[in-house]
Image (cartoon, helix red, strand yellow):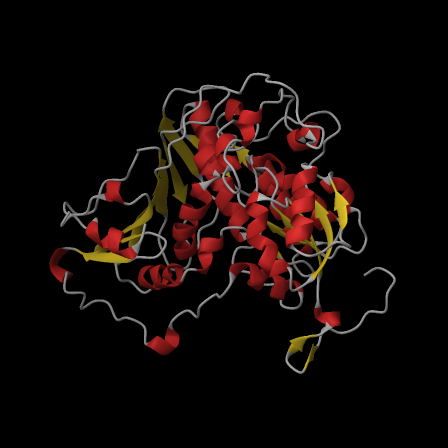
Amino acid sequence: MKRRQFLKSLAFTAPTALILPRVRLFGAEAPSNKLNVALIGTWGRGEAHFSGLMSENIVALCDVNEKHLAFGAEKMNCPKAKQHVDWRKLLDQKDVEAVVCCTADHTHAFVANWAMNRGKHIYCEKPLANSVQEARVVRATYLKNKNKLATQIGTQRHEFENFNRVRELVRDGAIGQLQEVSAWGDRQLRRSGYLPAEGSPPPDFHWDLWLGPSPEHPWNPGYFAGGPGMNCLSWNMFWDFGSGQVGDMGSHTMDLAWNAIDADLPTSAEAKGEPFNPEVTPVTLQTHFEIPANDWRQAIRVSWYQGGALPESPVKYLDVKKIDHGALFEGSKGALVADFTSRALFPMGNQADLTYYKSRPKSDLIPPLGNFQKQWINACKGSLKTSCDFDYGGKMIEMMLLGLVAYRAGKKIKYDGASGQVTDCSEANDLLARKYREGWALDG
């Protein structure tokens, strides 16, 4: 939603080579300062990474569709890059230092974990995982390697400066003591079940590799009817291939909230939504989590709403229905509503004049992040620090996926973040992990 639209809604209605230091020559990138990078997924979302990676040494490409491989090699002008259809073989290529993963959601955790196990930096498109267990395994692998590997989850809207302004307002007391946080998305894509068998995959499309660890399903071209960058909207609502809007726009919108509250894993989760479908994730859903206190705020409730479910507006003249994807922060003295690029503050009560709040001087504002993908590339070359690493983003998606567990269990569940176990519902524990096809292991 653009800023003008948002305001209208305010209810006025190298293994054997000589290792050289990474340096710059006369302001230009020296050859020794270029990463040996690989791109897994060379079409659709992968295209968003072409320009950022072309400044580096592109040594490998991978796609299960051979036509997309040729497309990527041509557009990125890297005819010498080794081409693969199986990402597992690419990760065994010794000269690859850093990997960008743009595969289907159900293989994200696999690519990320395998890459780190082989000592490779990894940028993984969202969602990082498709189960609570996957989120925990990948985060644990990262924490073991954080002093030598740079990671980033593809929540690229995080680079918008509004994320910083929202965090400053919440942290600096513009709404008083933080009490409750909600995020929501209103993308509604309904399907009744997996698509039936229809024809055979083209000879240059490796369907079995696309399925990867997921259970067997027959080919149907309808899974790829969305076009460049939009195919995910043809399959990510199915349990075996994704987590629906929880992993899709939920990853982006909850990031707006997560960035501002310094949250840890929840101690409980509960959910309600439309009747359970064993093949398709819910469209209409709301999930609620109890988040423990930290050194600057009390314990709070964090909620996610989707598919028409929405939090109650903090004021009568704000119509949250007009904000497709947004976040609401409620405090003891007011409320803050934001989307990705806009924000509005609503002081309440006797101190509605904001005399209790002192804004930061310009010199103390959180500095701009800059280009999100470039931040990761620079981190690979030095600092290893990124804004959405696998610790920060791993905890966020673990919480979101725990909400789906509570939805499937049909009850409020208590969660021990240290052990990764539900403490009061054995049925829910059985839902923390996915079942994989024989021959596929997450910790490969």
Seen from the viewer's position, the closer of residues 62 and 213 is 62
Q: Is residue 203 placed above or below 119 in the rendered structure? A: above
**Residue 388 visible here:** yes
Seen from the viewer's position, the closer of residues 164 and 269 is 164
Give the tally of numbered discs.
0
Quadrant housing residue 98: bottom right
In the rendered structure, the answer to whether residue 65 lies left or right of residue 154 reads right
- Residue 154 is situated, as x and y percent measured from the top left of the image, at 53, 50
In the rendered structure, the answer to whether residue 65 lies left or right of residue 131 reads right
- Residue 61 is situated, as x and y percent measured from the top left of the image, at 71, 48
Q: Residue at x 36, y 23 (%)?
A: 274
Q: Is residue 42 placed above or below 20 in the rendered structure? A: above
Q: Is residue 329 placed above or below 248 in the rendered structure? A: below
In the rendered image, the residue lying farthest to the bottom is 26
Q: Residue at x 73, y 39 (%)?
A: 85
- Residue 401 is situated, as x and y percent measured from the top left of the image, at 49, 36
> Which image quarter holds the C terminus?
top right
Q: Residue at x 37, y 53 (%)?
A: 340
- Residue 386 is situated, as x and y percent measured from the top left of the image, at 56, 61
In the rendered structure, the answer to whether residue 260 lies left or right of residue 427 reads left
Seen from the viewer's position, the closer of residues 234 and 80 is 80
Seen from the viewer's position, the closer of residues 372 and 262 is 372
